[in-house]
């Protein structure tokens, strides 16, 4: 218990409470935005938009070839604010150009693929613009974290979700599906414009070429691939449900059944977002890192028990908040709740520790194997068990990726030069 108290106190000392509150508000407003879209838009057409957005969602982290991830890892190792700001300028310029190229490629490809749902290509082309907007949005948030300004990082999250809800409601009410698309695209742009000036960046500054070498780009590239593969691991169920069941309403149903279980993942992200820069700065300190691991795992074991217990008792009531017809899928809901615990306890921590020691490619290999298993398993289980088959596959793989991340980190960390 003393470990948990110490862990939480250190988290609070780094303004973690601001990040926590901001993330809670963001989750609630994201729920609200999803609920508003469900009420204002035709369910079948919304399912097509969600199908298209699922494709874009797993590509968004690859914007800028993952250079935003290089920014936070290498930026944490720099000592001066001037160096961190110069690195930001480099990543902003190079990453923005790459994001534009990726967006153009997607726009062209979206009209060449014969999707099974009408308007998918059109929605995909428009939503590809979010790759640019989210890249800029992410590096601005990262720069606040590198400055140890977690308060501003938290505030930008709140402003983003408030704008998202406002735009979704107003635009969807007046312009239906087109308005919803517009809200998804412009919200990160608007938020970025509001906050980029607060960073006080000199865009004429230049970075030391030794920092932005091949390893820097390689790390970003593998980070992007890992994020793409990880996101695909989460949304492959939606894509395969749409493809195998050929029912856009089932896509919408699974999206909302999985919404609450996947949303609890905000919690490890809050702690990692607050602590990543700090434990990367101390990654060579063996005693510090293992103390952090013990504290983190103990805390999230307790969280997982509470999480599973609560939804075991109130799964039907939770699903009824969205739509009473979702209650029949409560078993799939509970399977996903249990599966998410594998990420809470293992994956959220050890995946980031692998990144911190520069072994991001290991995350990619683990996720790629899981992705292959996911596709093969879902092709067999979804036609037989429907949504429950997709939930079973996801739950098993969430534990698989978490445990293997733990094993590989411990193995590789022993080989890393460290301080006692």
Image: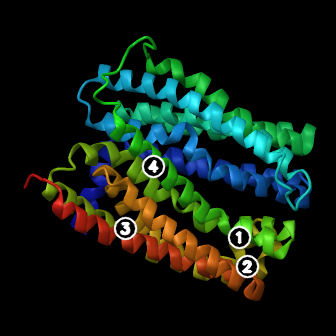
Q: CA distance from mark 1 to mark 3?
A: 27 Å
Q: Which residue is mark 3?
A: 405
Q: Secondary structure at mark 4?
A: helix
From the top left corner, tell me how far across and down residue 151 is, in percent. 43, 35
State which mark lies toward you, 1 or 3.
3
Of labels 1 and 4, earlier in sequence is 4
State which mark lies toward you, 1 or 2.
2
Of labels 1 and 3, earlier in sequence is 1
Q: Residue at x 70, y 56 (%)?
A: 54
Q: Residue at x 44, y 77 (%)?
A: 305
Q: Residue furthest bottom?
A: 384
Q: CA distance from mark 2 to mark 3?
A: 27 Å
Q: Which residue is mark 2?
A: 387
Residue 124 sits above or below residue 5 on the image = above
Q: Label 1 crowding class (10 Å Cα cut-off): few <14, some 14-19, many 20+?
A: many
Q: Secondary structure at mark 2?
A: helix
From the top left corner, tell me how far across and down residue 166 is, in percent. 75, 37
Q: Which residue is mark 4?
A: 223
Label 1–label 2 contact, CB within 8 A:
yes
Label 1–label 3 contact, CB within 8 A:
no
State which mark lies toward you, 1 or 4.
4
Q: CA distance from mark 4 to mark 2?
A: 30 Å
Q: CA distance from mark 1 to mark 4?
A: 29 Å
Q: Label 4 crowding class (10 Å Cα cut-off): few <14, some 14-19, many 20+?
A: many
Of labels 2 and 3, earlier in sequence is 2
Q: Secondary structure at mark 1?
A: helix
């Amino acid at each position: 218990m003393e470990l948990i108290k110490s862990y939480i106190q250190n988290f609070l000392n780094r303004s973690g409470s601001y990040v926590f509150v901001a993330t809670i508000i963001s989750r609630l407003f994201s729920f609200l935005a999803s609920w508003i879209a469900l009420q204002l838009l035709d369910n079948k057409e919304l399912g097509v938009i969600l199908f298209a957005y699922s494709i874009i969602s797993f590509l968004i982290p690859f914007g800028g070839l993952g250079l935003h991830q290089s920014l936070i890892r290498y930026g944490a190792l720099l000592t001066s604010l001037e160096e961190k700001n110069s690195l930001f300028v480099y990543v902003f310029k190079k990453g923005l150009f790459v994001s534009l190229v990726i967006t153009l490629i997607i726009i062209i490809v979206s009209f060449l693929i014969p999707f099974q749902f009408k308007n998918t290509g059109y929605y995909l082309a428009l939503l590809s613009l979010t790759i640019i907007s989210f890249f800029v949005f992410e590096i601005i948030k990262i720069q606040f974290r590198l400055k140890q300004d977690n308060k501003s990082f938290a505030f930008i999250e709140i402003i983003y979700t408030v704008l998202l809800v406002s735009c979704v409601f107003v635009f969807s009410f007046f312009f239906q599906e087109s308005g919803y698309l517009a809200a998804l695209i412009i919200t990160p742009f608007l938020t970025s414009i509001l906050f980029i000036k607060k960073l006080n960046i000199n865009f004429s500054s230049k970075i030391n070429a030794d920092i932005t070498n091949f390893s820097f780009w390689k790390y970003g590239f593998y980070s992007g691939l890992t994020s793409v593969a990880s996101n695909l691991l989460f949304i492959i169920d939606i894509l395969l449900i749409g493809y195998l069941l050929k029912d856009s309403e089932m896509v919408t149903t699974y999206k909302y059944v999985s919404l609450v279980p996947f949303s609890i993942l905000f919690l490890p992200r809050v702690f990692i977002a607050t602590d990543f820069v700090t434990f990367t700065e101390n990654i060579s300190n063996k005693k510090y890192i293992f103390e952090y691991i013990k504290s983190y795992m103990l805390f999230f074991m307790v969280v997982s028990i509470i999480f599973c217990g609560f939804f075991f008792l109130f799964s039907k009531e939770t699903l009824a908040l969205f739509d009473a017809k979702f209650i029949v899928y409560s078993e799939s809901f509970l399977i996903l709740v249990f599966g998410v615990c594998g990420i809470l306890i293992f994956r959220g921590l050890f995946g980031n520790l692998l990144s911190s020691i520069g072994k991001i490619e290991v995350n990619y290999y683990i996720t790629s194997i899981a992705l292959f298993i996911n596709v093969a398993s879902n092709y067999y289980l979804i036609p037989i068990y429907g949504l429950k088959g997709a939930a079973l596959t996801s739950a098993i793989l969430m534990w698989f990726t978490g445990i293997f991340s733990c094993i590989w980190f411990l193995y590789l960390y022993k080989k890393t030069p460290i301080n006692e």
